[in-house]
Image (spheres, helix red, strand yellow):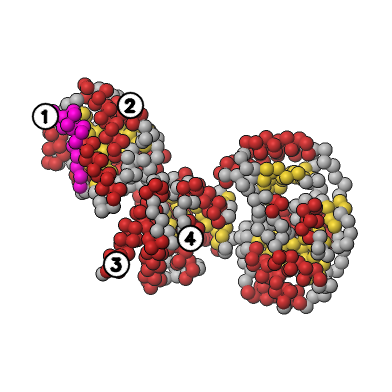
Amino acid sequence: MITHTIRYRTFYNGFCNKTIWPLFHYFQQYARYEKDLWDSYKQVNEKFCEVILNIVDKDDIIWIHDYHLMLLPELLRRKLPDITIGFFLHIPFPAYEVFRLLPWREEILYGILGADFISFHIYDYALHFLNSVYNLLGYYNKLGEIYIKDRKIKVDAFPMGIDYEKFKNASLQLKNNDEINKIYKDLQNQKVILSIDRLDYTKGIPNRLRAYSKLLEKNPDYINKVTLILVAVPSRSEVEHYKLLKKEVDELVGRINGKYGTFSWTPVKYIYRYLSFEPLVSLYRIADIALITPLRDGMNLMAKEYIATNTDGKGVLIISETAGSARDLGEAIIINPNNEDEMELAIEKALTMPEQKQIRGNKIMQDRIKEYSIDKWAERFINTLINIKNTQKKLNFVQINKKIENNIIVEYNNSNNRLLLLDYDGTLVPFSNKPDEAKPDKEILYILQKLTNDEKNELYLISGRKKDSLEKWFRMLNINLISEHGAWIKEKGEVWVTTELMKNDWKQEVISLFTLFMDRTPDSFIEDKDFSIAWHYRNSDSEIGFKRAMELKNILLNFVANFNLQIIEGNKVIEVRNATVNKGKIAQKLISMNKWDFILSIGDDLTDEDMFSILPDSAYSIRVGLNSTKAKFNMGSIEDVRKLLNKFITS
């Protein structure tokens, strides 16, 4: 019992609600980063994993919900690599600049990435998650799909719905209900504004009260004619921030009622308790206005519930732009919850809105809410999860396993005339924010030296980099170098020569265009090579960089039509080069130079596909990363490539 009490305090009231909840809702000043809270969070997630493993079958679907269990997907994945896992986050996922404040940010991301399908209420949250995955873990996404280890993961937004028919039918049945009749009687001739939420600092309840006070101050005619029903459901009342919030709300209600109230009229009817379903629907039915203006909210289903219960079409919803449900309720009055003047004007507008306009807007929202109900939401989620799992099984790649690796090593050892064609960036070394900083480390220099010292090997390093960089980094090795994807070649002991007769009279025009995009995209830069130009946006904000890259690519498509040029889209880089040069052409020349009894080609991006496509059937071609490819096999990481090459040396 003591252990359970401690875990409740340090897990639920601790890491969940003192760290994740405030940080993910942009109240980072309230977030506590304490290791004992984190340790408890890990222990509880591990306990959930342990219990699930005792009951789950291999064909089951596991659907994990919310911020309390963000480590669970990866914990389960380790034990059950092929299990189907979905994850849905019901609260906002914050922007990268906020999320990065969390000391255990990588662990949280890897935990969530254990799922096959990850979903959020709105695309903003999905984009924030993808940004954090890229900036902190380095995994790039394409249309919300991430390749990590041996899986493709889908990230998307599925706004949660409600049981529309339940609220609609309950509203119709309440027409002659005693409780609603009593409320009607108490508030005869009153315009009713309903504010209902948990008493939480993310909900902006004090802002609503101050805006209502401004309404009465500016419009004395509304005194005795408008009543605000404030329902504040108790929440985490033992936490200090919530105690202070309760005190502030109590004082604001007392101040408004004391200043404007009369013997026959109370401006704010304050209900501090949980309401069951029927009283809740009753309040929705009598409210002329629903004032639902959280400072930050994952979705807020009460806004949808209010619209569903207005069966006569009357009533006005005022909702904050920072609530996820605002994306589905565009016909409502949408306001900035921090702007109390705007909120007060919105209340005035709602009080005077013609009934026909109310009915017209509510009908559109009701049709939308009915279509995307809670059942439809769950069905769509599960179907998408199943589809992504099926897609994983059909991916056009063969992951190198122990058996395939052993076959490669055996053939390598039994051969006497080997051709090794190795890409550099993303294959032998990680990508670097600046091209000049991607110099080889001691391990890869050692591997390359050992391979080139073997007289049975003819090794070519084929890179998109400038020849000067390759010369500087590898001058101590007796190695064949190819730069700019095949434009330049330097055989062992020889000087650099061009492989084709090429013109570069087009470069100045492309540089001018790239400069324009560099100026518009902070932290991007241009790399000027002899026969190509590259625009790198690796250091830029990922969302801005991606949008600029798409725009630039469209412009270039028209430009290159007039020249013999090619657009190459690499990892966070767009390059324009002579179309006569590619890795496939230079590889074909090298293959024709000898009768090789072992050919191995390894690369990681689209430029290497040209090389894979021309290799003979007997060759081994490997693409690093789990992308569809013309290569025979896929390998998970740079580390895996190095391990394979090390086995060539030691076998």
Badge 1 crowding class, 10 Å Cα cut-off, few under 14, some 14 to 19, many 20 or more, is few
Mark closer to the observer (3, 2): 3
- Under mark 1, the amino acid is Ser
- Under mark 2, the amino acid is Leu
Mark closer to the observer (1, 3): 3
Mark closer to the observer (4, 1): 4
Q: Is residue 378 left or right of residue 168?
A: right
Residue matched to label 2: 345
**Looking at the rendering, in which quadrant would you find the C terminus?**
bottom right
- What is the x, y in percent for residue 492? 86, 62
Answer yes or no: is residue 349 visible. Answer: yes
Secondary structure of the residue carrying tag 4 is helix
Badge 4 crowding class, 10 Å Cα cut-off, few under 14, some 14 to 19, many 20 or more, is some
Give me the C-alpha separation between circle 4 and circle 2: 45 Å
**Looking at the rendering, in which quadrant would you find the N terminus?**
bottom left
Q: Is residue 537 above or below residue 45?
A: above
Q: Earlier in the sequence, mark 3 or mark 2?
A: 3
Q: Quadrant of residue 609?
A: bottom right
Residue at 77% of width from left, 58% of height from top? 473
Q: Are marks 1 and 3 in contact (CB under 8 Å)?
A: no
Residue matched to label 1: 264
Nearest the eye: 374 or 470? 470
- What is the x, y in percent for residue 176? 15, 39
Q: Is residue 225 left or right of residue 108?
A: left
All told, the count of numbered labels is 4
Residue at 84% of width from left, 42% of height from top? 503
Q: Earlier in the sequence, mark 1 or mark 2?
A: 1
Residue at 38% of width from left, 63% of height from top? 36
Range covered by the magenta-colored residues = 254-273
Q: Earlier in the sequence, mark 1 or mark 3?
A: 3
Secondary structure of the residue carrying tag 1 is loop
Residue matched to label 4: 107
